[in-house]
Amino acid sequence: MLPNRVVGAEQLRILTEREVELFKKRTPKSAAVFSKAQDVLLNGVPMPWMSDWGSPHPIYVDSASGNRVTDIDGNTLVDFCLGDTGAMFGHSPPETAAAVSEQVRKGITTMLPSEDAPWIARELGRRFGVPYWQVAMTATEANRYVIRICRTLTQRPKTLVFNECYHGSLDEALVHLDDHGQVTLRCEFDSNPGLVKESVARVVEFNDLKALEAALAHQDVACILAEPVMTNCGMVLPEPGYHDKLRELATRYGAYLIIDETHTFSSGPGGYTAAHGLKPDFITLGKSIAGGIPVAVYGFTARIAERINASFGRKPVSDPLGIGGTLSANAFAINAIRATLAHVATEKAFEKMIAGANRMASGLEAAIEKHALPWSVTRCGARAEMQFLPHPPRKGSEAKAAVYWDLIAYTHLYLANRGVLITPFHNMMLVSPVTTKEDIDLLLKGWDACMAELAAAARKER
Ligand SMILES: Cc1ncc(COP(=O)(O)O)c(C=O)c1O
């Protein structure tokens, strides 16, 4: 058994079975809806990720408000998943809800800009440091459009991504390195036959500058798509000086640098970019930017704006290259961004969130120490990651190797049964502006009891 797993598979199975029974007792109505939904929804859910919670069935939600989710059985959970960042500022922030309630009656979509559009662009520019902005519907789309722009401007085919990254459902980023260092699919079967992944992607490990330079030296990389901190495989922090070198190498080899702030917006009002003085060519950002209403943005430098207009951007040109969509930048979505930036995702809100997250992370570290577990906590602004590793991982593959699904299922079920929700696919916990000290204490109490149980089971095994 790997020491990081703490207990053997059989002990873990016994503990998990007890939690599964408890979960079923708490959620009979959700179980019934799940069972009936099998005939009409694939695996009982409207979207694949919704069945990925490690529980026998998902909870079906009655309502979500602030940092509370109430299911149809009447259980209320304190939410540290927050829609995997979509609800980073709380569910239905009142100011966003009020603004969009009015906008929804004033017109939703017209294929014409509203006055809110230049307002949000100016505000995003002030925060993130690049002047030009465009609006998409999701972060996946924002990344897709930016990749297309980079390919067009450079006339190069490939996007370079980091092993075990996630940037949405993009062919260029749903790749990883196999045991021989070759680009391969993230799963064992070909999920998109016909597309030769090697023709669109290069993959290297995060924090490995030598591998990065070797990949860029092929001169076929249009852009590097990077989260400034990897947040989807556990959490991988950049080593000191890494971002400076990344910037330098991108420039030297003629590749654009895209910083995807979708999750790392948790670092502050201008994301990780402003908090750490990064100088990307493009920034992409989705999920929480409009309080959870589906919309995303991408920003870029004045030099890039000029280059776009010198090639395909300025009218009259017949085709905007399939960038944007009919509903992109609709008045409703833009109004939601404006309300969220003006009243919800404020400097004060971030101060509170980051202070809460630091308190949470310190509490988790204290519990790990108390129970002498070989685990660690990594922080990124308002979010923290419990990692089943004694030290923070240096690269994606190291982080991913410590994502033990059965341990995740047990710990997350344990917490859910005690009224706490955390992110299903790994151990991310996010603090919203409305998360209280008492909420954080409830989370810490849950982890402490769960760790105590694991430590006791481990002692019994010895
Ligand atoms: C860093 C990052 N970028 C982009 C995306 C895609 O976001 P969406 O699913 O909202 O398109 C995600 C989703 O988890 C993400 O984590």
Image (tube, rainbow, N blue to C red):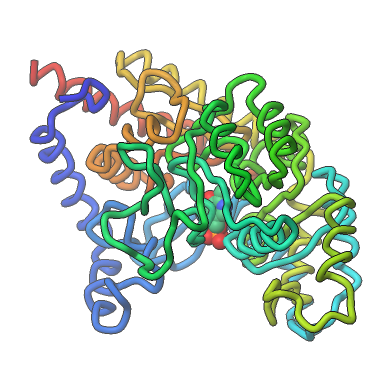
Closer to the camera in the image, 310 or 141: 310
Please say if 304 is above or below 442.
below
Q: Does 254 sit left or right of 35 as displayed?
A: right
On the image, the x and y values in percent for residue 6 come to: 22, 24
Closer to the camera in the image, 301 or 121: 301
Q: Does 140 sit left or right of 399 as displayed?
A: right
On the image, the x and y values in percent for residue 144 come to: 61, 62
At 68% from the left edge and 77% from the top edge, which residue is drawn?
A: 325
Q: Does 403 sit left or right of 251 as displayed?
A: left
Please say if 52 is above or below 245.
below
Q: Is residue 67 visible?
A: no
Q: Can residue 356 be seen in this view?
A: yes
On the image, the x and y values in percent for residue 429 come to: 49, 39
Q: Quadrant of residue 286?
A: bottom right
Closer to the camera in the image, 338 or 204: 204
Please say if 376 is above or below 251.
above
On the image, the x and y values in percent for residue 106 come to: 81, 83
Q: Quadrant of ligand 1?
A: bottom right
Number of numbered discs = 0
At 85% from the left edge and 58% from the top edge, which residue is drawn?
A: 307
At 87% from the left edge and 68% from the top edge, which residue is drawn?
A: 116
User: In the picture, which quadrant includes the C terminus?
Assistant: top left
User: In the picture, which quadrant includes the N terminus?
Assistant: top left
At 51% from the left edge and 21% from the top edge, which residue is drawn?
A: 362
Q: In which quarter of the image is residue 132?
A: bottom right
Farthest front residue? 218
Please say if 121 is above or below 5.
below
Q: Quadrant of residue 334?
A: bottom right
